[in-house]
Image (spheres, rainbow, N blue to C red):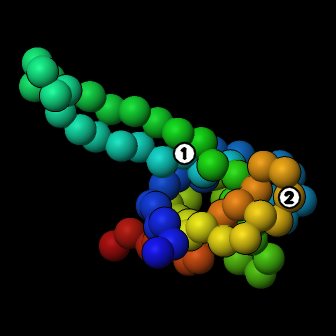
Amino acid sequence: MTKKFIGKVVSNKMEKTAAVSVERIFRHPKYGKVIKKHKKYLAHYEDLKIEVNDQVQIKETRPISKRVSFVIEKKIVKK
């Protein structure tokens, strides 16, 4: 099963690659405090017009390069 995440574009200065920050919210197992963690993924894109601060959905794919294993599937438009 392929992994899918929704995140925010942090950087698009590379050619056909964007850095996407994915936020994960969970409760601490012992103390119950709500914790936010961020992880940055490099994702490949071809035809989409991606800007910084855009909300996008990424999915796991075969390795495209050493650090790129995700593809930007679609841009999420907020209403």
Residue, x 80% and y 76% (percent of image)? Answer: 46
Instruction: Look at the picture and state if 35 lies above or below 20.
Output: above
Q: Nearer the viewer, residue 3 or 25?
A: 3
Q: Residue furthest top?
A: 31
Secondary structure, mark 1, is: strand
Q: Amino acid at mark 1?
A: Ser
Residue, x 19% and y 26% (percent of image)? Answer: 28
Q: Which quadrant holds residue 21?
A: top right
Using the rendered image of the protein, determine whether residue 75 is visible from the camera's viewpoint: no
Q: Which quadrant holds residue 71?
A: bottom right
Instruction: Look at the picture and state if 17 lies above or below 59.
Output: above
Residue 12 rendering spot, x and y as whole percentages: 76, 52
From the viewer's perspective, tell me whether residue 37 is left or right of residue 58: left
Q: Which residue is mark 2?
A: 65
Q: Which quadrant holds residue 65?
A: bottom right
Q: Residue furthest bottom?
A: 47
Residue, x 48% and y 55% (percent of image)? Answer: 7
Residue 64 rendering spot, x and y as whole percentages: 82, 65
Give the CA separation, mark 1 to mark 2. 19 Å
Secondary structure, mark 2, is: loop
Q: Are marks 1 and 2 in contact (CB under 8 Å)?
A: no
Which label number is shown at residue 21?
1
Q: Nearer the viewer, residue 15 or 33?
A: 33
